[in-house]
Every structure is written in structure tokens, then in C-alpha cells.
């Protein structure tokens, strides 16, 4: 009888331990998701929509609120799993909207659907964009030669697969001990930072309508720079050729 009671108690303690452990994992994984986000949603039917979204947690329950939206959108349910995958269900005047994405480093990106409308979205947490953008302006001292060779004015172009291309003029210049970027007459799309590494590696940082950072990673070959990019469900290439 005593052995049976001890066995039952052991099983119960194991179950309690597993429950507490799983709760701790869930809390650790979802830590940092709470907060306010600047969201950009894009679809062929709706174009580009910008609004704010607030995600909150109380115990094991999540809730959300959409603010400054061009169309009424009421959040009815929010779930976050142990891999930081976020699923948001909302109501838009009787139409169910499903917004799914994954949180990583201060941003959430993924897909959404509303009836027959489908698109992509990304949300940048308030305060999360400042650190990467600032870091992107740093120039490695070991890559000083490559940094000097990069200075100049470029015919620059970002191509978004299936969306078109965005030509602009890009200026790379030195400001004190670091390189900085400037896009004269910048519109929705802007290049806000540059990082140079050994081996002619050139990584730029862009923003779209103030949202980002969008990493443009690539290399320098002579008077040309270029590479590939991917952000918020979109992808493409970028190139720049120094003007003579």
C-alpha cells in the first residue's frame, strides 16, 4: 500500500514538474513579444495599409488591439506558441481576418487572409529599429581600404520580385570615422545605413515608409555593388554602379 502511494505521488510530482517546465519554456519563448508594433500589410487588392497593433499578455492569455487602421478591425483572439509563432484572428465588418507570423528580433512577419483577399504583413516593435540602424552605420577598421573605395555617387536600384523596380541615386560618403548613406529626394524607400566587412562585403540597411530595417546584404566588385534581400514575405535583388 505504501509503495503504491509513493508511486502515485511520484507520478503526480512528475506531472507537476512537466507542467511547470512547459510553462517556463512558453514564457521564455514568448518573452519580448508584448508591445506596440508599426504594421505594414500589402496585397494586390488592397495595396499597402499602415496601422498600429498592440499585443498584451496576462498570464497564459494573449489579447490584441489594432489602432489607427484605415478600416475597422477588431481583434478577437491571439495565440503565441513556444516557437514564437503568432496567430491573430480579427473581425472586419463581419469578415474574419487571419493574421499569422513569427516573432524574431523585434519584428513579426508573415501572411494574412480576409475572405478571398490574401497578402503579406510585417510589424516592427516600437524601439526595435533604432539599434540595428545605428549599428549599420559602423565601418570595420580592418576594412578601411574597402570603405574608401566605396565613397561616391551611385545609380542605385532595388528590384522586388513580382512588384517592380525602384531606381534612385545613392550617395556613400564619410562622416568622421564612418561611412554613411544618403538618398537625395528619398521617397517611401530609403537607404539609411552601411556596414563594410573584410572580403569586399557590403551590407546596406533600407526602410520602407519608415518601417524596417530591411537588410540589403551583398558585395563590392570594382565600381559596382549588389546582392539579394528578403523581408516581410518579399524578396529581390539590389544593384549600384558608381557614377564616373
Image: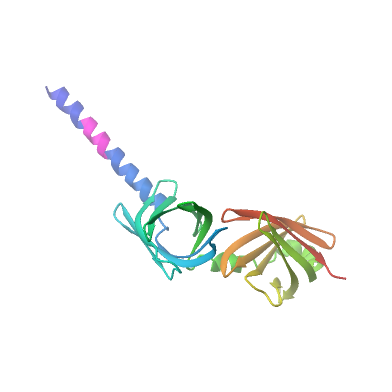
Taking depth in this image into account, of 86 and 193 the one nearest to the observer is 86
Instruction: Please name the residue shown 84% across and 63% down the image.
Output: 223
Q: Is residue 8 above or below residue 181?
A: above
Task: Return the x and y of residue 4 as percentages of the image width and height.
Answer: 16, 23
- Highlighted magenta segment, given as a residue range: 10-16
- Is 54 on the left or on the right of 137, as rendered? left
Q: What is the quadrant of the N terminus in the image? A: top left
- Is 220 on the left or on the right of 97, as rendered? right
State the residue lying farthest toward the right. Answer: 244
State the residue lying farthest toward the left. Answer: 1
Q: How many numbered dots are placed on residues in this image? A: 0
Taking depth in this image into account, of 75 and 199 the one nearest to the observer is 75
Task: Return the x and y of residue 213 as percentages of the image width and height.
Answer: 59, 63
Q: Is residue 229 visible?
A: no
Name the quadrant containing residue 147: bottom right
Q: Main secondary structure of the magenta part?
A: helix
Instruction: Please name the residue shown 66% across and 58% down the image.
Output: 163
Query: Residue 72 in magenta?
Result: no
Task: Return the x and y of residue 161 as percentages of the image width and height.
Answer: 67, 54
Task: Return the x and y of residue 153 as percentages of the image width and height.
Answer: 79, 72
Q: Is residue 171 above or below residue 113?
A: below
Q: Is residue 87 visible?
A: yes
Amino acid at each position: 500500500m505504501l509503495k503504491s502511494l509513493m508511486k502515485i505521488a511520484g507520478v503526480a510530482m512528475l506531472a507537476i514538474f512537466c507542467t511547470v517546465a512547459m510553462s517556463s519554456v512558453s514564457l521564455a519563448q514568448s518573452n519580448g513579444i508584448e508591445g506596440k508594433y508599426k504594421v505594414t500589410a500589402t496585397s494586390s487588392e488592397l495595396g499597402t495599409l499602415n496601422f498600429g497593433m498592440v499585443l498584451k499578455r496576462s498570464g497564459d492569455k494573449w489579447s490584441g488591439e489594432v489602432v489607427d487602421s484605415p478600416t475597422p478591425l477588431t481583434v478577437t483572439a491571439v495565440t503565441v506558441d513556444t516557437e514564437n509563432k503568432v496567430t491573430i484572428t480579427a473581425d472586419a465588418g463581419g469578415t474574419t481576418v487571419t493574421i499569422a507570423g513569427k516573432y524574431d528580433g523585434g519584428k513579426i512577419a508573415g501572411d494574412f487572409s480576409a475572405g478571398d483577399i490574401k497578402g503579406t504583413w510585417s510589424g516592427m516593435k516600437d524601439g526595435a529599429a533604432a539599434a540595428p540602424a545605428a549599428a549599420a552605420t559602423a565601418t570595420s577598421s580592418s576594412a578601411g581600404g574597402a570603405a574608401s573605395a566605396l565613397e561616391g555617387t551611385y545609380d542605385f536600384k532595388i528590384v522586388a520580385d513580382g512588384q517592380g523596380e525602384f531606381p534612385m541615386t545613392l550617395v556613400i560618403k564619410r562622416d568622421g570615422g564612418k561611412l554613411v548613406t544618403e538618398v537625395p529626394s528619398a521617397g517611401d524607400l530609403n537607404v539609411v545605413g552601411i556596414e563594410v566587412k573584410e572580403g569586399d562585403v557590403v551590407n546596406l540597411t533600407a526602410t520602407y515608409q519608415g518601417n524596417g530595417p530591411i537588410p540589403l546584404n551583398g558585395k563590392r566588385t570594382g565600381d559596382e555593388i549588389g546582392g539579394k534581400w528578403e523581408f516581410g514575405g518579399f524578396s529581390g535583388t539590389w544593384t549600384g554602379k558608381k557614377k564616373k
